[in-house]
Image (cartoon, rainbow, N blue to C red):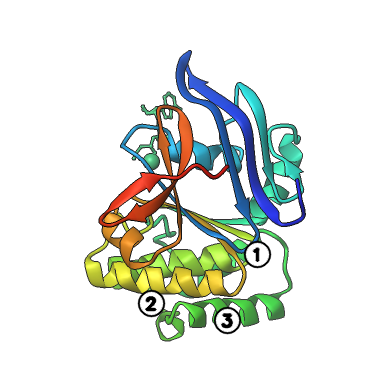
């Protein structure tokens, strides 16, 4: 893998209970790139993310994330791998019994950072998502869009090289969706690679970034031609 590639799937095949989902998938994401992953429901998009954070392992092929040969590392190394990436899901997954500040601080406490650093970093990432003023509120006090911004702040706390987002705007209205996209764009501008699964073509059109589609167990790169996304031949 070249220095500039942060994610690489090489000839990856994956099946669940002998049912094939991915067959010889190849995908490279470069440092600082923003990539949408689209495709029909049930096709295996979330499974691709799961391969990257080592929730599942491929039947064959290689998965690499930064310097980690993901499918070969020991369970002991998995936390280190996961520190390279922030992960954001569709359902917000905040801890209900602690406030916004503590939800974000938690991500740093588990990695053993010093209290002074934690405080500084939590306020910094909450500032980035525009929620410093809500730090003492409980998650239930916040709107869905605000909760998702807290999740993004938490995902960024460890300064990951990569942000994985699985339909991060799937439960949000258009205004909150736009807020999240502006934040993701800003994070990407600061150099973090973003791999985002989405069903929302309006977003893909409004915020144009490299777009790949998973179809028939394979990945293809797409480009806009008029109003349609069509396959292009360049290698993925
Ligand atoms: N742990 C598992 N065991 C068995 N089957 C699974 C498992 N995880 C996912 N699947 C199946 O594999 C297929 C791909 O699932 P995946 O969640 O990756 O799809 P997806 O493209 O993310 O779909 P959606 O757009 O609906 O989120 C689905 O048919 C799903 O039911
Ligand atoms: Mg999914």
Q: Earlier in the sequence, mark 3 or mark 2?
A: 3
* Label disc, if present, on residue 124 of the rendered structure: 3
Q: Count numbered badges in the picture.
A: 3
Give the vertical position of 75 relative to 81 (above or below): above
Q: Earlier in the sequence, mark 2 or mark 1?
A: 1
- Residue 149 is situated, as x and y percent measured from the top left of the image, at 41, 69
Q: Earlier in the sequence, mark 1 or mark 3?
A: 1
Residue 108 in sight: yes
Which element type, helix, strand or loop, lies under badge 1?
A: helix
Which element type, helix, strand or loop, lies under badge 2?
A: loop
| Residue labelled 3 has its Cβ within 8 Å of some atom of ligand 2 | no
Instruction: Tell me the residue that label 1 is attached to.
Output: 109
- Residue 108 is situated, as x and y percent measured from the top left of the image, at 64, 65
Circles 3 and 2: CB atoms closer than 8 Å = no
* Number of other residues with Cα within 10 Å of mark 3, as a class: few under 14, some 14 to 19, many 20 or more: some
Residue at x-position 45% and y-position 64%: 151
Residue at x-position 62% and y-position 77%: 121
- Residue 178 is situated, as x and y percent measured from the top left of the image, at 31, 71
* Number of other residues with Cα within 10 Å of mark 2, as a class: few under 14, some 14 to 19, many 20 or more: some
Give the vertical position of 60 relative to 27 (above or below): above
Residue at x-position 46% and y-position 68%: 184
Which element type, helix, strand or loop, lies under badge 3?
A: helix
| Placement of the N terminus among the 4 image quadrants | top right
Residue at x-position 36% and y-position 51%: 198
């Amino acid at each position: 893998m070249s220095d500039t590639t942060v994610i690489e799937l090489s000839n990856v095949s994956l099946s669940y209970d002998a049912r094939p989902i991915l067959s010889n998938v190849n995908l490279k994401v470069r440092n600082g790139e923003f990539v949408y992953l689209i495709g029909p429901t049930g096709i295996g998009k979330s499974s691709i993310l799961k391969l990257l954070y080592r929730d599942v392992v491929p039947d064959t092929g290689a998965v690499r994330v930064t310097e980690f040969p993901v499918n070969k590392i020991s369970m002991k190394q998995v936390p280190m791998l996961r520190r390279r990436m922030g992960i954001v899901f569709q359902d917000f997954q905040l801890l209900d019994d602690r406030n916004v500040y503590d939800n974000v601080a938690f991500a740093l406490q588990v990695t053993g950072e010093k209290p002074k650093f934690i405080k500084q970093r939590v306020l910094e990432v909450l500032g980035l998502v525009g929620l410093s003023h809500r730090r003492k509120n409980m998650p239930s006090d916040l709107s869905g869009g605000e909760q998702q911004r807290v999740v993004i702040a938490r995902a960024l706390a460890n300064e990951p090289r990569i942000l994985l987002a699985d339909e991060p705007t799937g439960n949000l209205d258009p205004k909150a969706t736009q807020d999240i996209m502006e934040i993701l764009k800003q994070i990407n501008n600061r150099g973090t690679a973003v791999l985002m699964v989405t069903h929302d073509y309006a977003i893909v059109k409004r915020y144009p970034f490299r777009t790949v589609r998973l179809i028939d167990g394979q990945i293809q790169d797409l480009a806009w031609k008029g109003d349609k996304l069509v396959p292009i031949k360049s290698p993925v």
